[in-house]
Image: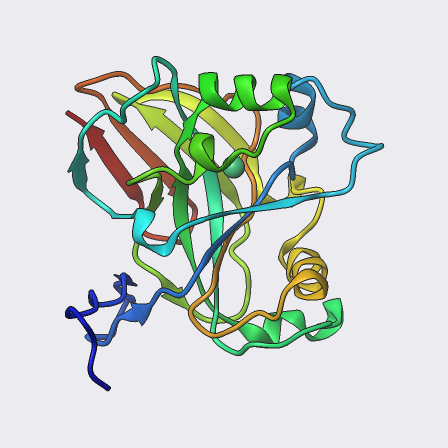
Amino acid sequence: MEYVFAPPAPPSLPVEGMTARFPLRRILCVGRNYAEHAREMGHDPDREPPFFFAKPADALVQHGAVIPYPPMTADLHHEAELVVAIGTGGAHIAAGDALAHVFGYAAGNDLTRRDLQAEAKAARRPWDMAKGFDASAVIGTLRPGATPPEGRIRCKVQGEPRQEAALSEMIWPVAGVIAHLSRLIVLAPGDVIMTGTPAGVGPIRQGETCVVEIDGLAPAAVTLR
Ligand code: MN
């Protein structure tokens, strides 16, 4: 194939114990998946089913990266999330079969321009520029294996605890997320799903380092310069 200019290499993630990398196709995200976070954002978790949004694949930020504070915001927030990497695609995947489609798991940070998101919500406009901006998806090294991690998810800014929850608090566990999403779109190898954040979201300021930790997985850290 000849192109009018050289296409960029696909964004990719490192994989524990392998030299080969995971080629990233799409970044899908769950909107609300922990009851306490839904409440802190002013919603009733018992009445609202999960919904999805997306970030472009080239919004990926590698663990340990130093990135510029994003433009057009004064309220950049961290959202610590479990990331599921899809290894086998499919549509209308049953929850009971869903984990067989998983390549592995990573820690992630769904960086959010909270002020732009609040404006978008108020005006009933899309969230793309609040969620899918450049360098908005921090994802750590993938741990291969279909079994979801158990234990806790944490977020620290400058070493200070900001978010902490048990992964078992997810309203929709990994299999349910995959089942729901695969009814809306055909999942494909290389897709990753950021599965929602627990309560305690808050700002990261210029010069600060934010680390997301999940028991059993490599951390996902980012520094804002
Ligand atoms: Mn999120």
Front position in the image: 102 or 132: 132
- Residue at the outermost bottom position: 1
**Left or right of 196: which side holds 218?**
left
Residue located 19% across and 42% down the image: 64
Q: Which is nearer the eye, 16 or 111? A: 111
Q: Where in the figure is residue 183, as x and y percent of width and height?
A: 72, 64
**Does 209 appear above or below 185?**
above
Return the residue found at the far front.
4
Along the viewing direction, whichever of 156 and 180 lies nearer the viewer: 180
Quarter occupied by residue 129: top left
Residue sitting farthest toward the right: 47
In the drawing, does residue 187 fall left or right of residue 190? right
The image shows residue 153 at horizontal and vertical percentages of 48, 39
Residue ID at (54%, 17%) = 119
Residue 148 pos. (x, y %):
55, 60
Give the x, y percent position of residue 136. Answer: 35, 39
**Screen quadrant of the N terminus:** bottom left
Asked whether residue 126 appears in the rendered view, the answer is: yes
Q: Quadrant of the C terminus?
A: top left
The colouring scheme, among rainbow, by chain, secondary structure or one colour, is rainbow
Left or right: where 25 falls relative to 117: left
Q: Is residue 45 above or below residue 138?
A: above
